[in-house]
Amino acid sequence: MTQMAKPATLSEGKLRQLYRTMLLIRRFEETATQLMIEGRLGTSLHSSVGQEAVAAGVCAALAPDDLIATNHRGHGHCLAKGVDPTAMMAELMGRTLGTNSGCGGSMHIADPERGVLGANGIVGGGIPIAAGAAYAAWVRQSGQVVTVFFGDGAVNSGGFHEAMNVAALWKLPLVFVCENNLYAEMTPQRVHSPTPDLWIRAAAYGMPGQAVDGNDVLAVLAVAEQAVERARAGDGPTLIECKTYRVRGHFEGDPEKYKDKAEALIWAARDPLERLKPQLSSTDAIETEIETILADAVRLAEAAAFPEAIEASRNVYA
Amino acid sequence: MRELKYWQAVNEALALEMARDGSVVMIGEDVAAPGGPFGTSRGLLDRFGPRRVRDTPISENLIVGLGVGGALNGLRPVVEVMFFDFLALAMDQVVNQAAKISFMSGGRQKVPLTIRTICGGGRNNGPQHSQSLEAWFGHVPGLKVVWPTTPADAKGLLTAAIRDDNPVLVIESLQLWQVKGEVPEGEHVVPIGRALVRRSGKDATIVTAGGMVPRALAAANELAGQGIDAEVIDLRTISPIDAETILASVAKTHRLLIAHDAVKPFGFGAEVAALVAEKAIEELDAPIVRVTAPWAPVGFSSTLERAHYPQPSDIVRGVQSLFGNA
């Protein structure tokens, strides 16, 4: 591991902002799951509960016109980048009010105005695209930094290695964020990778690599700021491995027979929200605000129309 | 009008579009310093610099991904996948990503991406450098697929592809590489989606595309000597296919043959045949005939390759069979 960035001392306001983002993600995921159970939201859901610190910490290091690409477990990254929770909830419900007008769903949230290139239904599929967006930022000298989120499953896809290689070779303004949540779909990490550490793969490409406690939002923010600064300065990409845990199944409804209960208890004690909370004065106002946002999101999304049948073949071409 | 070789026309289109629009970039294997594996990007590096003209590692999935991501962030990339066969390595980025993004985003994103590739068939390149895979891509909503036959079309269709706001696959034929033809100077755009009647005739319609077109024209000339006046349609765009031109021709000739270098099952010949069967079966005076490669990979030896790709004599026999003279 390269040297650890020291978490800076943050203002109460900044800490509250990080907590707010994490709580928004947590409650968004829990609300979506509950709606699915009630039959009000019929999509396959990949919950990021337990991984909120990665989304909140990394996105807090980004500028508004910086870009992110994410994966099938991407609700948190999109919310942290500023996508409207109502539009996202509507997308999960397949409504016209959705970020993608109901054409994409949970795995394809995209929002160009918030710098979200897109979530992705193909594991690893967003990584070459992020490299392309970073290449464009470099060609256009736009000053943008691109961040790509992916899991421990994606590091064994060819696109990861192809993109790591070219990003390092061309010194692209790109930050690779691996959320190692210990499971690739229904397979434990030890079954699909020879080493528990994934950040070490950066060395093969002459790129800085770093592991961080992915359940510590302040630690994540500190390493992300360092990587973003490096990328923006033209010094090239960084691989950050956020060690975290997928609290839920691969998908909501997954019986999770492959998971170790003792392991789940250990990680429950490392909950990212509970770890930040003691540093804050009362969070009641934040909690009330988030509940209102989500209640409005659900109400507006459910009131929104489903796409007309004619939309099934619209926008096939730009 | 001045003449250019097919590959020179590609080079000219790239240079003109890069000069016209600073967001056009050219990336791929051996495209910068080497000037392209077969010369099509010669001179571009010197003229437009290493940011816009870039050699990539041998990473086809990444090459197309760079184009998709670049297109989503303000560029109009032209990416080169050296041989048609190599697109198999990039299928996720082409099919799941580039082609779907406009639809999947509800129209909020677009991917103005040109994917150039070279069909190596007919030049003894062996089984993994010679396939005609256009049907794979014609089957994907959101993609456009063009296949120029002449130097003028090579310039005009590539220009149209670069200016299009959608992902366009441009197939170039290595067997046509040195063919010379008149090419308009300056801006020259051939619209995507329109076929061209290369030879007008009244007795039978031959629908074909790409490297097969010159062989179809040779067959038509031979047939003329036998008193059969064949019309030859060069599709130019595989997808979206120009139904209007095909149907108008069949309404005139009442006989249809489709010739392609790809294998027969599920090839574009099947699509053209189905189109005519659906829309104009009453116009036909004879069953539709397809002249295609046999159900096999392309062999290396020149005798095997010649046996694989339909020759003018095969097309002549096919057209004769439309008149009951098999």
Image: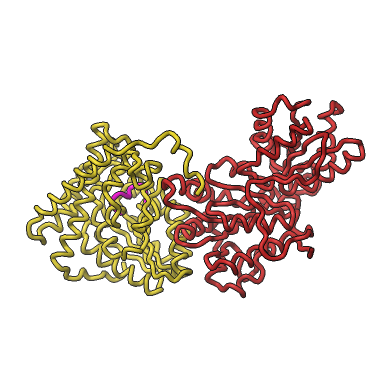
Chain colours: A yellow, B red
**A49 left or right of A310?**
left
Seen at 21% across and 68% down, the residue is A7
The N terminus of chain A sits in image quarter: bottom left
Seen at 23% across and 46% down, the residue is A28
From where the camera sits, is residue A117 visible? yes
From the top left corner, tell me how far across and down residue A237 is, in percent. 39, 67
Count of numbered labels shown in the rendering: 0
From the top left corner, tell me how far across and down residue B222 is, in percent. 88, 41
Task: Identify the residue at the far left of this view.
Answer: A282
Seen at 52% across and 55% down, the residue is B112
From the top left corner, tell me how far across and down residue A208 is, in percent. 37, 68
Seen at 73% across and 42% down, the residue is B208
Image quadrant assignment for residue B310: top right
From where the camera sits, is residue B37 visible? no
Image quadrant assignment for residue B48: bottom right
**A69 left or right of A15?**
right
**A168 left or right of B94?**
left
Q: Is residue B289 above or below residue B261?
A: above
Query: Magenta span has A72?
Result: yes
- State the extent of the magenta-drawn residues as a range: A71-77
Q: Is residue B243 above or below residue A223?
A: above
Query: Magenta span has B26?
Result: no
- Front residue of A125 and A168: A125
From the top left corner, tell me how far across and down residue A245 is, in percent. 26, 50
